[in-house]
Image (cartoon, rainbow, N blue to C red):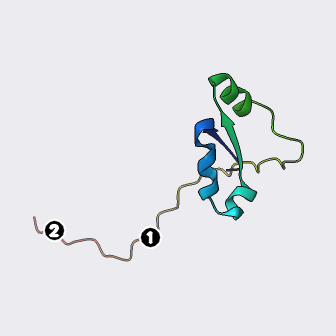
Amino acid sequence: IKTVIIPKENQPDLADFDKAVLDAVSFVPVERIEEVLKAALTAPSEKSAPSPAPQEFAPPMPKESRRKPAMIDC
């Protein structure tokens, strides 16, 4: 997470965060929904690297069982 949109009234609470967090994350204080939409729906900056393509999920292959089948008396 690189950008967090927060209510403007919570901006003073940012002083409680570690400096490392404040340096790594951009906090955008907003008052109105229009500001939220503008911040959330803008194109990513040219400086940011493109996200890597998601890897396709392949479920793990079942391992062969070492157990012998149970003997059933009929």
Across and down, in percent, residue 36 comes to 66, 29
Residue occupying image coordinates x 84% and y 50%: 49
Dot 1, how many residues are within 10 Å of its Cα: few (below 14), some (14-19), or many (20+)? few
Query: Can residue 7 be seen here?
Result: no
Dot 2, how many residues are within 10 Å of its Cα: few (below 14), some (14-19), or many (20+)? few
Q: Which residue is mark 2?
A: 72
The residue at the far left in this view is: 74
The circle drawn on residue 64 is: 1
* 8 left or right of 42 in image: left
Residue occupying image coordinates x 84% and y 48%: 48
Amino acid type of the residue that numbered disc 1 sits on in the rendered structure:
Glu
* 28 left or right of 59 in image: right
Q: Is residue 53 above or below residue 38?
A: below
Q: Nearer the viewer, residue 57 or 22?
A: 22
Residue 64: quarter of image:
bottom left
Across and down, in percent, residue 56 comes to 65, 50
Q: Nearer the viewer, residue 49 or 29?
A: 29
**Element at badge 1?**
loop
